[in-house]
Amino acid sequence: MSKKLCKPFKRDLNFSGLDHIVIGSGVGGLTVATWLAKAGKKVAIFEKHYVPGGFTHSFKRKDGFQWDVGVHYVGNMAKDGSLRGFFDFLTDGKLAWESMGDIYDVANIDGTEYIFKAGKENFRKQFISYFPNEEKAIDKYLELIEKANKRGSAFFFEKVFERWLSNSVGWIFRKRYAKYTQKTTYEVLSEITKNERLIAVLCAQCGNYGLSPQESSFGVHAMVIGHFLEGGYYPVGGADQICEKTLEVFTANGGTIYINADVTKIVTKNKQVQGIQIGEKFISCKSVISNIGVNNTFNSLLSETDRNICNFNLKNVKPASAHICLYLGLNKSSDALNLPKHNFWYYKNQNIDEIFHEATLQNAPKNFAYISFPSAKDPNWDIVNPNTSTIQAITIGKMEWFEAYKNTNWMKRGKTYLTLKKEFEEEMLKVLFKFFPQIEGTIIASEVSTPLSTANFTSYKSGEIYGLAHATERFKLPFLRPKTKLKGLYLTGQDITIVGVAGAMLSGLLCATTILKFGSWKIFKEIGRSKK
């Protein structure tokens, strides 16, 4: 549907007079582009994919089924939620959100089930019922989440400071947050409890940021857990409505989005951006905003000289994890099959780090699975797609498992590759049938995506979905901020803040504020008025 709002890129189109060019149409790019367009700037988005939206887009097949690729739930979307006003601003209030209910996640660890209830006090009581001897640890945990996130808010807001201000006072924000970011999640939790099962349950949602407890920064754990603490929400009509409704507002305010537009170079001269190159076509502008990840931006679109000017160095930071996903279409409704709205996390045992580290293509789904039921979350699904439902089942994936197929083309990777995908599907179905036996005999469509699929559409070389790994080192990188040392080059997206729809949206907000400066406060006032 969003394609109707897009223009296929053609060399002979008129691209003159652009203030800002945004590379990539994920949430970070959509956000900054829409803010700038609403501020009266002439903005164009260039997207390499044939559909916009980044990880918010959905894909359809001839049998009529539609699946999301990256959005499974979003937090803080109640009418008075801290992020709702921003999304209402981006979509002129046309994007509706459906609550997932009192329970938003369920974790099953070697046969024992743990429920995550919406609301801090509900969460607290539920966990104390599971671990009655750990009340002090649970209270301390919630206190740490709150304290870390207060420091985190200041840390991320500091990214809009001009360099001189960042150098003079910004270090205070960075130092205060380092107390939480420079320890792993496991280190922090093991200081408040020795109960390994409690630690495992508190980390059961770690797939939301893609690193195991001993690898992840506690700062990102706290942000993600805090984000969902009041419950999960799903966009009515499916994840692609985030992009659809935002693009409607963006284009209504004079913005243009081009698809099939693979930017090959950011053109600079004398440390200043001149425009972009798409093949042999040069398009000039006053500034370029990259939303395709810092790795792709610096290593693929900039010269070595420009990389050195920006002080770009990722020696100590790896890309985030990749995944394999099974998409299923069923011939009965979510109600008929009693499919839940909540997400389901399965771990064969409580050794999460071991499960992540020792994963192979053969054992990954046997040991870990994240299962989501989009059709159950979306009240519009049954209206548009009666008597059907969808499931997504995800596990760990590594690009190295598919090394032999890296030089093949999408949808044309050969019989051996298809056999690997089929074997994965069979193993994942065993897990699904174990916990949801009612779906046996109802599957009429299935598809598997691997890290190669992600790499094909995002240019993330390792097939990662979360950009840079959310490890402790990430929070020390000086160039992860909207404004670079090249005049006119800005960055947005999850690498600038943290993973997820909310993280990417906030990165766009920070980038727009960096560019508009005090002009951005008019927008904040508008958002504030709309929430009253």
Image (cartoon, grey):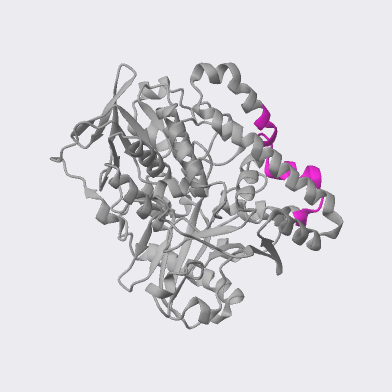
Q: Quadrant of residue 60?
A: bottom left
Residue at 77% across / 59% down in the picture? 125
Q: Quadrant of residue 79?
A: bottom right
Number of numbered discs: 0
Residue at 37% across / 70% down in the picture? 65
Of the pair 214 and 244, the residue shown nearer to us:
244
Residue 307 at what x, y percent from top left? 40, 25
Figure quadrant of the N terminus: bottom left
Of the pair 391 and 463, the residue shown nearer to us:
391
Residue at 56% across / 61% down in the picture? 364
Residue 35 at what x, y percent from top left? 39, 39
Q: Is residue 487 magenta?
A: no
Above or below — where is 106 with respect to 514?
Answer: below
Q: Is residue 428 visible?
A: yes
Q: Is residue 178 magenta?
A: yes
Residue at 52% across / 78% down in the picture? 335
Residue lying farthest to the right in this orientation: 133
Q: Is residue 457 left or right of residue 256?
A: right
Of the pair 283 and 89, the residue shown nearer to us:
89
Q: Which residues are the magenta region?
A: 176-198
- Magenta segment, prevailing SS (helix, strand or loop): helix
Q: Is residue 44 left or right of residue 523?
A: left
Q: Is residue 279 left or right of residue 338?
A: left
Residue 362 at what x, y percent from top left? 54, 63
Residue 31 at what x, y percent from top left? 41, 42
Residue lying farthest to the left in this orientation: 12
Q: Is residue 406 visible?
A: no
Above or below — where is 472 with respect to 462?
Answer: above
